Image (spheres, rainbow, N blue to C red):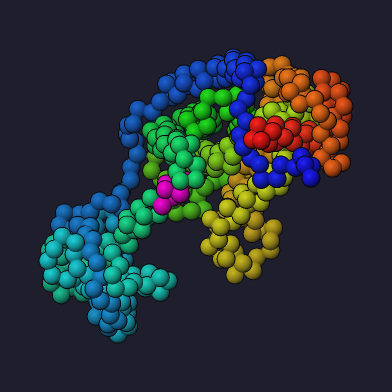
Amino acid sequence: MGHGHSHGHTEHVEPSPTALAARKRANWLLVAVLAPIAVLTIVAMLVMWPSGSKEGITFASPYTAAPGVTFDTGKIQAVTQESCTQGTQAPSTNGTNQSSGAQPQGSQCTFASTQPDNGGSPVKVVINPDVAKSHGVRVGDSIRYLNLSGVQGAAAGNGSPSYVFLDFVRTVPMALLAILYAVVVIAVARWRGFRALLGLAGAYVVMVSFMLPGLVEGKPPLLVALVGSTAIMMGVLYFAHGFSAKTSTALLGTIFGLGITALLAAWATDAANLTGIATSEGATLVNMSDKISLSGIILCGLIISGLGVLNDVTITQSAAVWELYELAPETGARKLFTSAMRIGRDHIASTVYTIAFAYAGAALPILIIVMLYDRPLVDALTSAELSEEVIRTLVGSIGLVLAIPVTTLIAVLVVKATGPRRLAAAVAADPEPAHDDGDVRELETAGSADAFESFDTGELAAVVMTRRARREAERGQ
């Protein structure tokens, strides 16, 4: 009847004073390794901190308009299909160069009767043909449009529309989605989830204030990416997970993965001749300034893109090693590493295709176009449109895969270096052997490291949990 099973028993057992002392020793050991890295990161950031100057950069912002032209918002009241009486393009503004959606004489155009948010009578906004065909507009949509009515002659019957569609206003749905995301994260992860969100905001600050301006000013892209990414990971990991040996171990593994990713990205960017001009954004950047290096931006992007998944696997792997060690502290280093790597291999298998699918989803329009062109697979994958995504996937995956065994090894070395915690006290409190219906083998010599070494870590965990459950049951009687 009393078989010692503990199904559903997940009560947390507080670590002993000996365990706390071991964790403290592990923390000091890791601080000795990480402190120099943190100092170098801070010094490098101070030395490379961008000035914020935009000298030498020439560009026409699409968000500035000529005198008399404004960007207005409003809500659509009605959508109509009318004959296009205009046959010319809307007047060009300073940097806007928006198409009016004009069609040849006699063709049909889509117009949206829009109520301006700043008041006044409804205005007739012409909808660009590509928007009308791909997504369309509906009554109730909030849109942003170009108001050309203030330009002399724009509304004087010269054949050009006075109001031209620019974009949808997405503030409300995106804000609601962001709030829902924050609520879900905090509800499930509680205080740690809240800290993770704040850490994400801090990472954004590092990118906007250091990494992006540094690339614009021509700072070494490899150093900018490494230093900025290391600073982000230090802040995010410690802020979200707290100062602990597990977090520090994960940080060391992450830094190693970053280093591998950076080296591979630097080689691949040059060897594969990634130019970055296949996109309109790249073509725009290359003409803005001689200081901006598109290949450097691609290199930095290859490193940053793998940060999230890399952080995920290292913190999980580090936690796995520490949990296994807590359950079976007498297990030898080799056995502990082997057991943790069983978990790591499953993590590798899942995260590799996670990265691939994430990038495939982002590049889906390009993939469809390539498919319709009916090009050979090798030609398509090595084309300017897809090669950057393929290399990003491969570089990130290699860094990710190599980070798992390194993180596991570091975690094992740290937990063993802090000294094994004997289970003698626990066994003395419960000298009876745990049979568990033969599912768990007898732990014959509790104080012997050789006896622990002969057990699989899963069996050791079962032994410990069975005894804990039995003691809890006895206390409850």
Placement of 275 over or under 465, stated as above or below: below
Q: Residue at 25% across / 70% down in the picture?
A: 76
Q: Residue at 74% across / 36% down in the picture?
A: 466
Left or right of 367: which side holds 170? Answer: left
Q: Quadrant of residue 330?
A: top right
Q: Quadrant of residue 213?
A: top left
Please tell me which residue lies in front, 225 or 407.
407
Q: Residue at 59% across / 42% down in the picture?
A: 309
Placement of 441 over or under 420, stated as above or below: below
- Provide the residue span drawn in magenta: 180-185
Left or right of 244: which side holds 47? Answer: left
Report x, y in % for residue 184: 46, 49
- Name the magenta segment's main secondary structure: helix
Left or right of 90: which side holds 258? Answer: right
Looking at the rendering, in which quadrant would you find the C terminus? top right
Residue farthest to the front? 477
Is residue 205 in sight in this rendering?
yes
Placement of 9 over or under 27, stated as above or below: below
Report x, y in % for residue 69: 18, 58
